[in-house]
Image: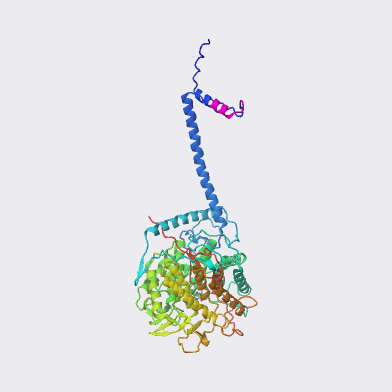
Amino acid sequence: MYPPPPPAPHRDFISVTLSLGQSYDGSKSWRRRSCWRKWKQLSRLQRNVILFFLTFLLLCGLLSYISVADQWRAVDGRSAEERKVRPADPPVLPAPQKADANPENSPGLLPQKPQRHFRRGPPNLQIRAPDKDSKDRRQDDTRRRDEVVGDARQEESTQRTVVSWRGAVIEPEQGTEPPSRKAEGPPTKPSSQAPGIQNQPASPNERQRAVIDAFRHAWTGYRKFAWGHDELKPVSRSFSEWFGLGLTLIDALDTMWILGLKKEFEEARKWVSKKLRFQKDVDVNLFESTIRILGGLLSAYHLSGDDLFLRKAEDFGNRLLPAFQTPSRIPYSDVNIGTGAAHPPRWTSDSTVAEVTSIQLEFRELSRLTGSKKFQEAAEEVTRRVHSLSGKKDGLVPMFINTHSGLFTHMGVFTLGARADSYYEYLLKQWIQGGKKETQLLEDYLEAVEGIKRHLLRRSEPRKLTFVGELAHGRFSAKMDHLVCFLPGTLALGAHHGLPADHMELARALMDTCYQMNRQMETGLSPEIVHFNLYPQSDRKDVQVKPADRHNLLRPETVESLFYLHRLTGERKYQDWGWEILQSFNKYTRVPSGGYSSISNVQDPLNPQPRDKMESFFLGETLKYLYLLFSDDPALLSLDAYVFNTEAHPLPIWAPPRVG
Ligand code: DMJ
């Protein structure tokens, strides 16, 4: 017998022997048995230490897996986002810090962060690859936006603004769902898509290419004969000045971006950077320069992310502010951007109502971006004062307002056309811009629509076209400006944002009428003003034109509304109507050497009489709306993310402020 072996000496260290690959007989069970035996031979302490060590390793593994997975998800999301490069950056870009200075005198207008132009380039046409900082900024923006949108949704679910107007109860958050497009062509995503979640940009379709061709032709003329001037005179191959600020060029910036015209955009940007100077002894019209220049610069900033445009916009906004220094706070129509002297037109101390109430989208946005409240305050004071004035008729406003007394003048005349039109448009659009919270704007808008229905709507003979006439001291006139054709689009937009469904019905009916105003003319282009026939027994056509009203200025309103109607109903006929109009523009207004010209007679296809002027809004609005009309992608400048100013410059809808 052998004595029992002495107890193994106690060792306070662990030795683990791995016999990898040494299979005695190649059997797995042997390996398992041998491991188990070794495990049993270990002391309790050794076993505990091993178990602790293994648990620790397991935990570390788990934690690092979670973090790596997160990073991958983020990377994946980012690249997906970047793959979806859109012409428009999602709305609500970060608002830079406030700073007051003239960019021409000092580079310090905006916060003194490192000056880098981070430009994203037109769709599919990255001008310059974004550097790391800009990428980071975009990611931060996206993150912040997602948070804000998340908050907004949460808030919406708990607080729903219910506005009542004469029995109509409106729940503004209930937008109309975009229709299904069954019979209308390829299915599209609903336009209520969250901002920033957009599809791969589609390459332009045939009709959009035709718009690009038209734009290039117009631009060629402007570039050759009017570069840096306000408007092209295409027939005489020269130019005209209004403000001397390169109006067409600025008005067209965002259109170039949207159409993907990289080279043209870059060249125009260079002009803005090197040549555009606002320190000039020149009078500008407050309204026209706000909607075209301020609006154009703000949009260009939003789409491109290029600070240059915001610096210019702030400089320009500062120069417009003296117009508001009137006894009534209702601004003068004109202001000298060099001297700061503001004044009404020579013959009156009145301003027009549309002009003083259609600058708010731009001034509010400028305040939001710069952090300087003075722009918003000046513009909103006008809204408040007009809101509480007497002299309205069921929400309809007169056309003039006095800058000394602050009261309406020329009372008793009501129109949706010139001098009043965009008052109504901006009530709705400001409400949308501000996140559908400013109920006073909504109430005024709803009341006005009821006023239109009650006092201005009639149907023509024999085709029963619904139209909006005018009222002068109780007398109805069957006169309608082409300008009124903005209304179907605005009504449809309101219905989309939750306003009563009968607004959409009215929008459709008025859209038909506006189309007929074009269709019934020999050139297929609407005159400036029409009169509708009200007499059933006559052999007259529905749409009558007086000799003095036969001109067409290349205005956008019909195609603007066609864009909204198509976007919000999905019906292809609206695209087809727009296509007809584009062809008419090409046939009767295109000048071979470059550019398009307004014409004097839409009823004479043999001699439409070119007037030798291409208005800046042909590039800023008409061609932009045509391009958007021909798109089947509701995410392209989504109507849930952007609101277009009255010159077709898209501005972001503000996310609601964070609560708490
Ligand atoms: C544009 O300047 C704007 O659309 C404005 O609201 C009305 N006039 C022209 C276009 O017709």
* Residue 6 vertical position relative to residue 648 in the rendered view, above or below: above
- Quick one: 475 or 382, which is closer to the camera? 475
Q: Name the outermost residue toward the top.
A: 1
Range covered by the magenta-colored residues: 24-35
Q: Is residue 31 one of those drawn in magenta?
A: yes
Q: Position of 613 compared to 410: left or right?
A: right
- Spot occupied by residue 460 in the image (x, y as percentages of width and height): 46, 83
- Spot occupied by residue 289 in the image (x, y as percentages of width and height): 50, 72
Q: Is residue 467 visible?
A: yes
Q: Is residue 596 visible?
A: no
Q: Main secondary structure of the magenta part?
A: helix
- Spot occupied by residue 361 in the image (x, y as percentages of width and height): 45, 68
* Residue 113 vertical position relative to residue 63 in the rendered view, above or below: below
- Spot occupied by residue 91 in the image (x, y as percentages of width and height): 49, 61
Using the rendered view, name the quadrant where residue 454 is placed: bottom left
Q: Name the outermost residue toward the right.
A: 593
Q: Position of 632 compared to 416: left or right?
A: right
